[in-house]
Image (cartoon, rainbow, N blue to C red):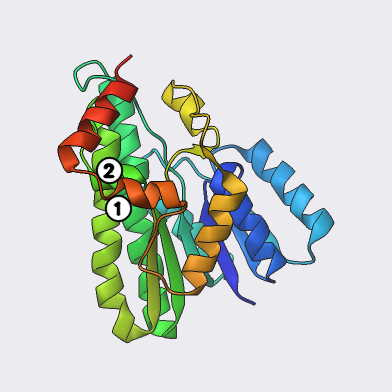
C-alpha cells in the first residue's frame, strides 16, 4: 500500500490534498496539532473512501517534533511514498513588533521541522529508490516581504531548499516539487490577522493544480495565471506592493 503523509491535513490545501490522494487509492497519514479535527477528518474520509487512514496529533511548532512524528510512524511500521510538507503559518507586523516566541515557532514549523521531516523521509525513499515530496512554499518566496519579513523569508528558504534537494534526489529515483500558491481561501489569513483577499483562489483548485504538478514531476508549481504573471514584475515594485498591503 502506498501512503501519503500530509502535515496540516485538517483544513485548507492539506485537507483538499488528502481528499485527492484518497480518491486515487493512497492510504493516508494525516498530521495536525488538533486531535479532534483529525478524528473528524478521518471519519469524513472513511465514509467515502475504502483506504487505511492513520492520524497523528503533533505540534510542529516545537523543536524536535518532526523527529518524534517520524519515530511514531516507524513504530507503526508505515512506509511513506509521498510526503506533503504543508503545515505552516504566517505573521504580519513590523519585525520589532512581532512577538519573538511566535516568530521562533513560525520558523520552527515553516523551516526547521520541514527540513527535519524531509531529511528523515527522503533517506527511506532513497533506499526504496522511489518517492515524491511536495514542499509548500508561497509566491512570497520570490521577493522580500516588508511587514511580513520572517514569513516571506521562511518561504524563500523552502523554495531554495526544495530546488536543491530535487537536484540531489533525481538520480536516486525520488521526485521533489515545490508549491508556491498565492492568496488562497483557507484559515491562513485569519490566523495571520488580516482579511482574505477577494480574489483568493479556492483551496480545492490549488490542491488539484498541486496534485497534478506533483504527479507530473514539475519543479515549481505556481497556481493561477495572475500569480505567475506577478513574478514578472520588478522586485522593488513587488516589495512596495507587499508593504502597502500588509502595513495597515
Q: Quadrant of the N terminus?
A: bottom right
Label 1 element class: helix
Up the image or down, 77 lies above or below 149; here it is: below
- Residue 152 spot, x, y in % from top left: 28, 39
Give the residue at x 43% y 62%.
134
- Residue 220 spot, x, y in % from top left: 36, 62
Up the image or down, 41 lies above or below 176; here it is: above
Label 2 element class: helix
Up the image or down, 13 lies above or below 98; here it is: below
Q: Quadrant of residue 19?
A: bottom right
Total labels: the figure holds: 2
Quick one: 220 or 27, which is closer to the camera?
A: 220
Task: Estimate how packed mark 2 is, as few (under 14), some (14 to 19) or many (20 or more) residues with alpha carbons within 10 Å.
Answer: many
Point out the residue furthest to the left here: 236
Q: Are marks 1 and 2 in contact (CB under 8 Å)?
A: yes
> What distance separates the C-alpha of mark 1 from that of mark 2?
6 Å
Q: Is residue 49 left or right of residue 83?
A: right
Q: Is residue 22 visible?
A: yes
Q: Quadrant of the C terminus?
A: top left
- Residue 109 spot, x, y in % from top left: 37, 42
Q: Is residue 86 left or right of residue 57?
A: left
Q: Which mark is residue 158?
A: 1
Task: Estimate how packed mark 1 is, as few (under 14), some (14 to 19) or many (20 or more) residues with alpha carbons within 10 Å.
Answer: many
Q: Quadrant of residue 127?
A: bottom left
Q: Is residue 30 visible?
A: no
Q: Is residue 245 left or right of residue 21?
A: left
Give the residue at x 27% y 65%.
163
Quick one: 175 or 196, which is closer to the camera?
A: 196
- Residue 110 spot, x, y in % from top left: 35, 44
Q: Which mark is residue 113?
A: none
Which residue is identified by label 2? 154
Q: Quadrant of residue 95?
A: top left
Amino acid at each position: 500500500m502506498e501512503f501519503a503523509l500530509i502535515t496540516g491535513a485538517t483544513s485548507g490545501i492539506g485537507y483538499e490534498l488528502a481528499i485527492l490522494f484518497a480518491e486515487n487509492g493512497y492510504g493516508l497519514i494525516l498530521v495536525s496539532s488538533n486531535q479532534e479535527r483529525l478524528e473528524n477528518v478521518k471519519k469524513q474520509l472513511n465514509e467515502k473512501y475504502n483506504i487505511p487512514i492513520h492520524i497523528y496529533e503533533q505540534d510542529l511548532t516545537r523543536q524536535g517534533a518532526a523527529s518524534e512524528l517520524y519515530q511514531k510512524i516507524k513504530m507503526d511500521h508505515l512506509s511513506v511514498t509521498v510526503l506533503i510538507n504543508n503545515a505552516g503559518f504566517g505573521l504580519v507586523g513590523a519585525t520589532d513588533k512581532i512577538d519573538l516566541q511566535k516568530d521562533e515557532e513560525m520558523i520552527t514549523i515553516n523551516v526547521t521541522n520541514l527540513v527535519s521531516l524531509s531529511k528523515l523521509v527522503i533517506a527511506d525513499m532513497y533506499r526504496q529508490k522511489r518517492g515524491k515530496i511536495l514542499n509548500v512554499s508561497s509566491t512570497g518566496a520570490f521577493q522580500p516581504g516588508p511587514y511580513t519579513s520572517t514569513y516571506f523569508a521562511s518561504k524563500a528558504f523552502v523554495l531554495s531548499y526544495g530546488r536543491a534537494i530535487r537536484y540531489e534526489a533525481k538520480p536516486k529515483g525520488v521526485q521533489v516539487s515545490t508549491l508556491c500558491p498565492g492568496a488562497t481561501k483557507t484559515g491562513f489569513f485569519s490566523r495571520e490577522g488580516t482579511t482574505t483577499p477577494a480574489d483568493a483562489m479556492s483551496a480545492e483548485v490549488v490542491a488539484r493544480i498541486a496534485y497534478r504538478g506533483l504527479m507530473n514531476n514539475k519543479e515549481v508549481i505556481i497556481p493561477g495565471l495572475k500569480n505567475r504573471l506577478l513574478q514578472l514584475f520588478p522586485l522593488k515594485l513587488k516589495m512596495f506592493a507587499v508593504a502597502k498591503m500588509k502595513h495597515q
